[in-house]
Image (spheres, rainbow, N blue to C red):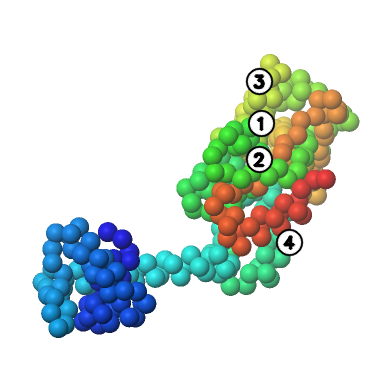
Amino acid sequence: MRLEQLQAFLLVAERGSFQQAALEVGVNQSTISRQIHALETELAAQLFHRGAQAKLTLAGKILLERARRISQEWQSVSQELRELHQGKQSEFCVAAIYSVCKTNLPPLLLQFCRRYPQVQLRVTALGSDRALKVLQDGLVDLAIVMHQRHLVQRAGLVVRPLYTEPIGLLMAENHPLAGKETLTWAEIASYPQVVFKEGYGMRRLIEEEFLRRCLPLTVALELNTPDAFSAIVHSSPMIALLPQSILLESAKQPGLTIRYCPPEELIQRQVAIVTTSDRLNFPPVADFFHLVTNKLSQP
């Protein structure tokens, strides 16, 4: 069954004439007749009584309402897709890691809202793994995450690296390590750690680094909100390895300090923007993708 067959059926049913239906769409009557005949053959039912007027049979009457609903749904989805391609998307959803939501993203969100005032923008702070999952499940249009090696291997994803930033150590200002200008990984490994929960890119990065150096990682506490890291570290001997964007925000609070490893031992994380190739066909998604890429990409 094809859509044009249903449309031909509706025209004949509404006009009561094969000839009138053909005139309305500018085709030969034989074309309409062939479409109706093909539909009747597929349904194994006669749809019209042929005569001076084309009158619906019982089977035709049963099909009529359903054909109208199918036609209305098709018109509705066609209009919706046309509006998407015209940038008239009603909602735009972004999932991003917390540090980006708190630091780099707010001014870009304001630019987007001014450009698309009719679009409802929704932003959710999530860990990298969860952000990628909701993107691939179709729950968000775009994700900003920690870059991962396997990302480029996923079919249908468009990935653009944005920037890299060093990982440093957050601690209380009276912590024993605070007296050192730079730190070794062996020194870091000797203290209990506050880490992100499983499913966060930072957790995986830290675990891989300790494993690579054959050093023990003593996990004392798992969190998923960077603000909570500051509160815990401030009043305990625990330390936390965090990206520089979070460290700089945390260091503004009294009683906290940050330290780094020497350049040859410093590790970094890379942040990337990700969407699916089909979503880049829609102006709001494409514009936001390019806005973030242009503003946050390192030269």
- Give the residue at the far top of this rendering: 214
Query: If you read the primary sequence from the N terminus, does the residue marked by circle 4 or circle 3 appear first?
Result: 4
Q: Which mark is residue 146?
A: 2
Q: Do the residues labelled 2 and 3 touch (CB within 8 Å)?
A: no
Q: Residue 205 carries which label?
A: 1
Q: Do the residues labelled 1 and 2 touch (CB within 8 Å)?
A: yes
Q: Residue 211 carries which label?
A: 3
For the point 67% across and 65% down, the residue is 112
User: Helix or strand or loop: what does disc 1 sit on?
Assistant: helix
Residue designated by label 4 = 107
Residue 234 visible (yes or no): no
The amino acid sitting under disc 2 is Met
Query: If you read the primary sequence from the N terminus, does the residue marked by circle 4 or circle 2 appear first?
Result: 4
Viewer-side label of 4, 3? 4
User: Helix or strand or loop: what does disc 2 sit on?
Assistant: strand
For the point 68% across and 70% down, the residue is 114
Using a 10 Å C-alpha cutoff, classify the residue at mark 4 as few (fewer than 14 neighbours), some (14 to 19) or many (20 or more): few
Q: Percent x, y for residue 250?
A: 76, 46
Give the number of marks.
4
Query: If you read the primary sequence from the N terminus, does the residue marked by circle 4 or circle 1 appear first?
Result: 4
- Image quarter hosting the N terminus: bottom left
Viewer-side label of 1, 2? 2
